Amino acid sequence: MGMNGSTMLWPLRQGLPPADLSGAAGSASCALPARYEAVRGARQFTRTTLSQWELSERFDDVALVVSELVTNALRHALPADTPREPHEAPVRLHLMRWSSRLVCAVRDPSHASPAARETDEDCSAESGRGLFLVESFSDTWGWHPLAGSLHGKVVWALFRLEKE
């Protein structure tokens, strides 16, 4: 898991898209509310962004990973008993594209590290497979605590893109 120490991912450690986009071909971000309907919004945002970047052929794999990362943030990083302001959007989705890679990152306010749970041998459990799917459909994934005054973490997944 992960690419700790990679300069490509330094903005994710801070929870922000790159300030200097000269090395990136594109960057897009959206705030997501603390509701499960946010997963659909994240998928729509991903579809629109990948279409603009002419990467529509990657939508199925990327959208599955985005769905899992957002669902995990909502389920595990934002417990139902956590008081929040109704207008607060505690989860952010970042998509960043370079010529040979695409990074999907989800920022949430929890400090808890993401962990793949063991599932039953018969795979009857409905939950617990999300990070296994992220690992299966992306080239690599990882997470970083947020730096400085920001609170929480960023969980990211990297997709290699074919060179043109």
Image (cartoon, helix red, strand yellow):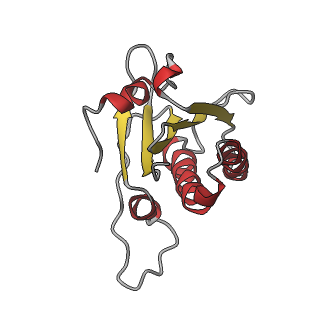
Whether 26 is drawn above or below 38: the answer is: above
Q: Quadrant of residue 53?
A: top right
Closest to the observer, 34 or 3: 3
Closest to the observer, 78 or 135: 135
**Residue 139 x, y percent position in the rendering:** 38, 55
Q: Is residue 109 left or right of residue 1?
A: right
Q: Is residue 101 left or right of residue 59?
A: left
| Residue sitting farthest toward the front | 164
Q: Residue at x 31, y 28 (%)?
A: 7
Q: Is residue 87 left or right of residue 147?
A: right
Closest to the observer, 97 or 115: 97
**Residue 31 x, y percent position in the rendering:** 66, 32
| Residue sitting farthest toward the bottom | 122
Q: Residue at x 28, y 41 (%)?
A: 3
Q: Quadrant of residue 87?
A: top right
| Residue sitting farthest toward the left | 5
Whether 161 is drawn above or below 152: the answer is: below
**Residue 143 x, y percent position in the rendering:** 36, 40
Q: Is residue 66 left or right of residue 42?
A: left
Closest to the observer, 59 or 75: 59
**Residue 108 x, y percent position in the rendering:** 51, 35
Residue 91: tell me if it is visible: yes
Q: Residue at x 46, y 53 (%)?
A: 162
Whether 87 is drawn above or below 76: the answer is: above
Q: How many marks?
A: 0
Residue 90: tell me if it is visible: no
